[in-house]
Amino acid sequence: MVLLYMIGRRKDHNAKRDIGAELLESVRQMKAGRNGAIHKIDVPQIVQARISAGLSQSQFATLMGVSVRTLQDWEQGRRNPSGAAMTLLRIAARHPDVIREVQMA
């Protein structure tokens, strides 16, 4: 019963909305330079290193000598790289040009 009541209320609310007017107001706000909420997210160091090198997950994983799945696990924090892999990742983060050079060789 409660679910049917809530669905009915939602339909009533939506029937009263003027979508066109809402869209026009949004366009006016954009033109006036009023931005919506800005969200900042922390990107893991591993992802930053890969992106700085300009490589896809597949390319970066091949360069690191690991599977794409392992790289994804590192990037998503499910697993941590070993000591040697972590050293390579630090180099990649600090010197993305070196990683690109190795990839081209």
Image (spheres, rainbow, N blue to C red):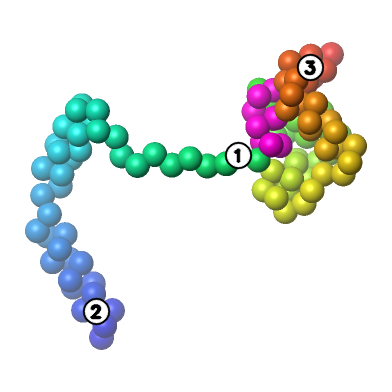
C-alpha span from label 1 to label 2 = 42 Å
46 magenta-colored:
yes
Dot 1, how many residues are within 10 Å of its Cα: few (below 14), some (14-19), or many (20+)? Answer: few
Relative depth, front residue between 53 and 20: 53
> Residue 98 shows which numbered tag?
3
Relative depth, front residue between 44 and 26: 44
Quadrant hosting residue 23: top left
> In the picture, which quadrant includes the C terminus?
top right
Residue at 69% in and 43% down: 75
Q: Nearer the viewer, mark 1 or mark 2?
A: 1
Residue at 52% in and 42% down: 41
Magenta residues, as a range?
45-53
Which comes sooner in the sequence, label 3 or label 2? 2
In this rendering, the answer to whether 17 lies above or below 29 is below
Quadrant hosting residue 101: top right
Secondary element at tag 1:
loop
> In the picture, which quadrant includes the N terminus?
bottom left
Q: Which residue is mark 1?
A: 43
Whether residue 27 is visible here, answered yes or no, is: no
Secondary element at tag 2:
helix
- 67 on left or right of 54: right
Q: Are marks 1 and 3 in contact (CB under 8 Å)?
A: no
Q: Which residue is mark 2?
A: 4
> Residue 6 shows which numbered tag?
none
